[in-house]
Amino acid sequence: EVQLVQSGAEVKKPGESLKISCKGSGYSFTSYWIGWVRQMPGKGLEWMGIIYPGDSDTRYSPSFQGQVTISADKSISTAYLQWSSLKASDTAMYYCVRRGIGRGLDYWGQGTLVTVSS
Amino acid sequence: DIVMTQTPLSSPVTLGQPASISCRSSQSLVHSDGNTYLSWLQQRPGQPPRLLIYKISNRFSGVPDRFSGSGAGTDFTLKISRVEAEDVGVYYCMQATQFLGSYTFGQGTKLEIK
């Protein structure tokens, strides 16, 4: 069974750093792109970027380039999303997702809620 | 970036009746490889999104056959033949034709029961 399991909810202060994770299982982790999607409270889905764990090829949405860093450790089948300096506007649910058949986003993590508040 | 525009943004439907959601892209979604990478996702309240349809009309594994997708070029439609209570949620179209960093979603259509 394909699964993406994300790390737990985080509460941080503005200016702090954060790295959240997404562990894949049940498939060849290095053979599928893993993307990250943001959903701000009560809002729609936003594409942040994507990584190919096989060679760490990474692409960012222009809206998120320079704001976050996407990485992966294929030895432990885990992808990451990190911030060096959080802002209140980073408060959102973040989903990791596998790009699968027909470029559909076929398997989703359960989401990691990030709350940034002073 | 390709802009995806969904209509309507809200759709009250009677149980057992059909529902239809439209999605229009600001430019053609036909890729140079001949495929059209338009998909539909469902997000039930409090849940992560779920893939329903990929490449316009292909149902993902486990998706009931009351869901169907159609369209071409820049105009696409998701249809539910007979709405059930479990179909309540927000539906998104998404394009994956553009380069990897620039996938885009529609604004979402909220399906609710009358």
Image (spheres, coloured by chain):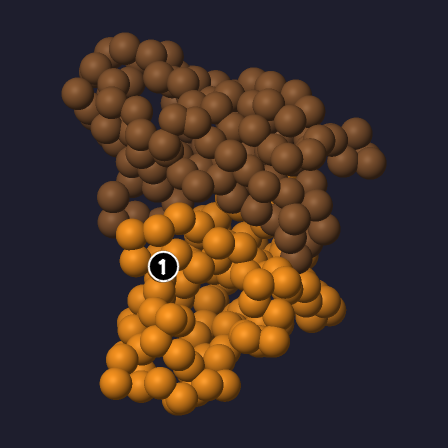
Chain colours: A orange, B brown
Q: What chain letter is assigned to the residue under label 1? A: A
In this view, A115 is above or below B56: below
Name the residue: 61% across, 49% down: B103
Relative image position of residue A18 (x, y in whole percent):
42, 82
Q: Badge 1 local density, few (<14 within 10 Å), some, or many (20+)?
A: some
Relative image position of residue A29 (x, y in whole percent):
60, 61
Front-lying residue, A31 or B31: B31
For label 1, the residue is A40
Q: Amino acid at mark 1?
A: Met
Query: Among all residues in the image, which is located at the extreme bottom?
Result: A16
Q: Secondary structure at mark 1?
A: loop
Q: Quadrant of residue B33 in the image?
A: top right
Relative image position of residue A16 (x, y in whole percent):
39, 89
Q: Quadrant of residue A93 in the image?
A: bottom left
**Left-right relation of B15 to B70:** left
Front-lying residue, B113 or A58: B113
